[in-house]
Amino acid sequence: ALNVSVKNSPYSTKDPANPFEDITTHNNFYEFGTGKGDPAANAGTLTTDPWSIKVGGLVNNPGTIDINDILNSPELEERIYRLRCVEAWSMVIPWVGIPLASVLSKYDQQGDAKYVSFETLVRPEEMIGQKSAFGLDWPYVEGLRLDEAMHPLTILAVGVYGKQMPNQNGAPIRLVVPWKYGFKSIKSIVGIKFTAEQPATTWNLQGPSEYGFYSNVNPGVDHPRWSQKTEKIIGSGIFGSRRQTEQFNGYKEQVASLYEGMDLVKNF
Amino acid sequence: MAQSKLWTKTPTWIVYLIGFLPAAYLIYGVVTNTLGPDPIKVLENNLGERALQFLLIGLAISPLMRFAKINLVKYRRAIGLTAFFYVSMHLLVYTVLDRQLDLSAIIDDIWKRPYITIGMTAFLLLTPLALTSNNYSIRKLGAAAWNKLHKVVYVAVVLGALHYMLLTKTWQVEPIVYFVLAILLVGSRKFYPKRKKPIKAEAKQLYKQPEIQNAAAPNLKQRRISLGRYFILRQAALKRPC
């Protein structure tokens, strides 16, 4: 178990969290297969210790983060966040993590750094989905604008329900950006870079018309193949309910200012 | 045509019984709440996949007969109706459980989402086929018209497979396999071996023999049936083993 002082984070939602079972058996993690149950079935093979993250790009002091430094960080806290998948379903998850900003601020960025890019591990011998000739190109890559990355809601998560991150959820360390569609929250991170240009992102490369760089949760902008107006609540059973999807997944108050003056239909 | 005793004697209700097993398994999953965190999606996907499987099995019956001389035609109606049962359940889960009868959302989906438009079209194409899958309809429509109508299944299966392929976020193996199978099974109809010429030649030969000509010929000739058919009927008329 992680050493978390469970304080009531002001960033946590009051919505009831899904049980551990839901969170660990309904996953999108194509490195372990495309089915929702595949990650739980196949991710056991992943070695997560030792683990480190290389930090580089436009910084004056590139370096390596050891996962243990984060696992033992006094800054760890519980953040109960809504998660809205681009596939129009949602969950509530009690993550344990530290603000990404507090990790990034240790690095002396160069003036022209405007974005942060992230990269997932490539290890086909342990990640069966990476052996498939179909599907995504590896490594999985993601990115945020620097101000999005530094936002207090953005965390690097290392656990769920006070326990270390289950492999199928992106062990040992993953990003969580609660106002964006789930695929932005890249899993099993091994690299972080500061960049001047907007970094390439995996799903955008896969389908540029379907997945934008921003991918902010937005009920007003449909996915070309399905509506984003409502979402299915995972764990609510066979006669379960849908709920209206909220702008920025309900985090509008905290994050709307990041996008002031931007056309969110064009920059979807 | 070669027929094993096993498959000529097996009653068709066995097909309905076996066909219902996957549905029973899903119902069991619903009752025991073991379909996982997103049971609606599991139902939707499973029912849709079964529908495709039964449609493909139904499409395989005729090539099996033409290429492998295995005659399972007797079971085709049951297979087709089972497929339609799964198509209907799939649609029902989508409209009632997934979309919760939100009519405007459903219409929006059908109108704007090509994979749903395509899936819905396949359902609409299959409906008259299911409704006419009975002896009464065959008599009423006449065999030729009925056969023509039921060729619509070729279009419906390809659309169904396309519907599956268009809904996944990346290229995945399974939908591609279904689509390729659908194309191959429909396409195989172009390559049916020609009916044996000797039958025709033999019939012609027989036709020349006066004693056969006398059997029932005038009626048959008036109906302008093919020589092959004429031969078979003539054989029957002469009470010979065919």
Image: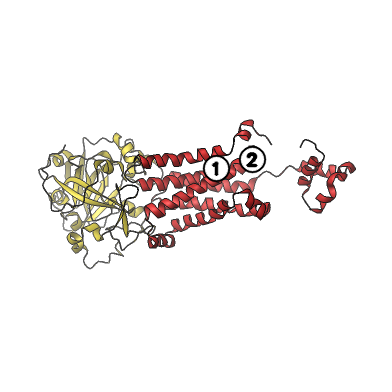
Chain colours: A yellow, B red
Q: Is residue B181 visible?
A: no
10 Å crowding of disc 1: few (<14), some (14-19), many (20+): some
Q: Residue at x 16, y 51 (%)?
A: A12
Q: Position of residue A240 (x, y in %)?
A: 32, 50
Q: What amino acid is found at the position of numbered circle 2 in the picture?
A: Met
Q: Is residue B136 left or right of residue A258?
A: right
**Quadrant of res B148:** bottom right
Q: Position of residue B39 (x, y in %)?
A: 35, 45
Quick one: SS at disc 2?
helix
Q: Is residue A84 left or right of residue B62?
A: left
Quick one: SS at disc 1?
helix
10 Å crowding of disc 2: few (<14), some (14-19), many (20+): some
Q: Which mark is residue B65?
A: 2
Q: Is residue B210 visible?
A: yes
What residue is disc 1 on? B57
What residue occupies the far right of the structure in this picture? B210
Q: CA distance from mark 1 to mark 2?
A: 13 Å
The N terminus of chain A lies in quadrant:
top left
| Mark 1 on the same chain as mark 2 | yes
Q: Residue at x 15, y 52 (%)?
A: A101
Q: Residue at x 58, y 54 (%)?
A: B152
Q: Does the CB distance between marks 1 and 2 fall below 8 Å?
A: no
Q: Position of residue A93 (x, y in %)?
A: 22, 47
Q: Chain of mark 2?
A: B
Q: What amino acid is found at the position of numbered circle 1 in the picture?
A: Ile
Label whose residue precedes the other's in the sequence (1 or 2)? 1
Q: Residue at x 79, y 53 (%)?
A: B224
